[in-house]
Image (spheres, rainbow, N blue to C red):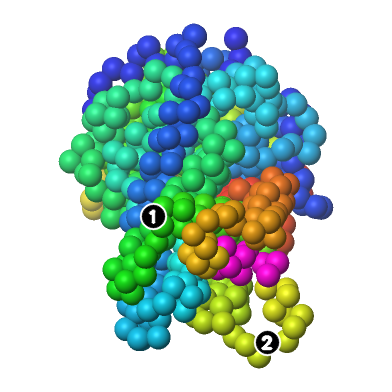
Amino acid sequence: MSEIALRGGPTAARRLPALAPVLATQVRYQLTMLIRTPRALIAGLIMPGLLLALEAGKKEHVTMAAAAPRIAGLLAFSAVAVAFFIHANALVIAREEGVLRRWRVSPLPPWAYFAGRIIATVLLTAASGLVLVFVAVAMTGVHLTGHAVAGLLAADVLGALALTATGIALTPLIPSAQAAQPVLMLVYFPLVVLSGSFGAITDLPHWLTTAMTYLPAQPLIDAISGVMQHASGPLMSAHDMVVLVGWAVGCLLISVWFFAWDPHRPAHARRAGASTTARSA
Amino acid sequence: MNAIIVKDLVKRYGRFTAVQDVSFEVASGQVTALLGPNGAGKTTTIEILEGFLAPTAGRVQVLGANPRTGGSLGRAWRAKIGLVLQNTSLDAQLTVTETLMMFGALYPDARRVTEVLDLIELAPDARTKIGALSGGQRRRVDLGLAIIGRPEMLFLDEPTTGLDPEARRRLWSVIENLAAGGSTVLLTTHYMDEAQHLASRIIVLADGRVVADAAPDELRAMGGVPVIQFRLPPGSPALPPALSQHVGGGVLTMPSADVTADLAMLVGWARENYVDLTGLEVGPPSLEDAYLALTREGALSHV
């Protein structure tokens, strides 16, 4: 470490940077981190892309009516993987490694930290969705109008927002980085399979079919599928929009109260030691 | 003006009391070391000062504000604080430069990234991802994040743990320069030489209480009777039994309640056996001896 003078460090009056550029910096680096997470690209783009390619190889999917639910399902599969599973998993790891507690005492307001994470996740989800749509168009030959693309984007963004918020709200229930993947899988797989991401399941009990329409994945699939098949009209049904907005707002409100910034410590460790993270006080 | 005011601080976890009636003040620009064995309450104290934990009772003020809220200043208060946490906590996917830029964007008048890279001597690794750095290098990035905002108050929780001796010395010089620039520094450490070198004042905690609060030299004097120290030349004849019981590793280290009498015994032995006493030292106990004596007494007095 060099002897460069550090004098004049603390200064009396200093203007804090405006929040907009601070938020933009957060989004930029959170996006960089997500893109550098191989699992995000594999689960969000490569896996659904491969499945899409397999689906496109089947002749019966050339009509829009047949192709739309399959494409919508795979877009939702990608969104759930990136916005819910990958993001929540990374958040638990960041918490357990103490990254969150460092941010908590930085001059960055907590809302700006989360806004940065959420916007970055939504952007990556939407970008993955767009790439998958282009792949689908190229491989199936279906025609998409500007209205359909706008609707797809709106649904993807709203769906990603709901799924990201759901993942954030779930993290306080996950006690360790090791537990993150199994716990999230427990939610992730039923969500994507029962919602029809890989094709509609027809023999489900009625109550389960109804319940799925109130979870975030099914309305996302319905919204994407609907907008692909209808050249005009609303971008999304009122039911789908209310469910997705409800999950986004509800889960963010829950997180305001219950989100845990500090690494989880078992009760015996709290009694034996002193601080929240300190292995030695 | 005091940068830190701690008054009757208590922190309990259920029935376990981590910190009990701790009070001290730290003047602006002072480098203070908080010492204590594991479980003494120093990290709990520093985490309360950093704003991570709420005290159970007592009053805490850092740069004129309650650390839990930052007072009415909020962001502005946080921007005056620099932290090196006990455990390194950085996003592994970003490079060193990206990490410094991301944090630098939060502060008014932040140091340039190149300047910080030079200070922490990581310029050659500027484009290396954090995940690929060694533990010592990550520690240096931690320090870089702590100083990038030109902090008025710097909390360093065991900042040199995991660093090699050379890197420790260099980090000391960074801390000294920061203090010379007007920053107040509160550090915890397990290295006595570090505390003695950096701090103008040492607060010793034991069993959650302050057992000593003094300058390093005063602390040494508080550690008990003077010590006679002499490295025995190879092949030295046997010392009198009263002295030989204090020999370890070829060095006589003898706490002495009566220096004149003990020295006379040693000099008499040396004269009889033609032993050269060059290197003989008489002085207060080392900081480590004093620290061990204080923490032992402190822990025992509260059992």
Q: Which mark is residue A127?
A: 1
From this view, report whether residue A58 is shown above or below residue A277. Answer: below
Determine if residue A278 is in view.
yes
Q: Position of residue A207 (x, y in %)?
A: 76, 80
Residue nearer the viewer, A74 or A3 = A74
Q: Is residue B52 magenta?
A: no
| Gap between marks 1 and 2 measured at Cα | 33 Å
From this view, report whether residue A249 is shown above or below residue A148. Answer: above
Residue in the picture at 25% in, 21% down: A4
Furthest residue toward left: B124
What's the amino acid at mark 2?
Leu
> Number of marks in the image?
2
Residue nearer the viewer, A202 or A92 = A202
Q: Which mark is residue A204?
A: 2
Residue in the picture at 49% in, 45% down: A119
Q: Position of residue A191 (x, y in %)?
A: 60, 74
Residue in the picture at 44% in, 15% down: A10
- Could you say which quadrant of the image residue B167 lies in? top left
Give the position of the N terminus of chain A as an image quadrant: top left
Q: Is residue A222 magenta?
A: yes
- Could you say which quadrant of the image residue A171 lies in? bottom right
- Determine the chain carrying the residue at label 2: A
For the record, the magenta segment spans: A213-223
Q: Please, what secondary structure does the residue beneath circle 1 have? A: helix
Residue B177 located left or right of residue A194? left
Determine if residue A152 is in view.
no
Q: Position of residue B259 (x, y in %)?
A: 49, 30
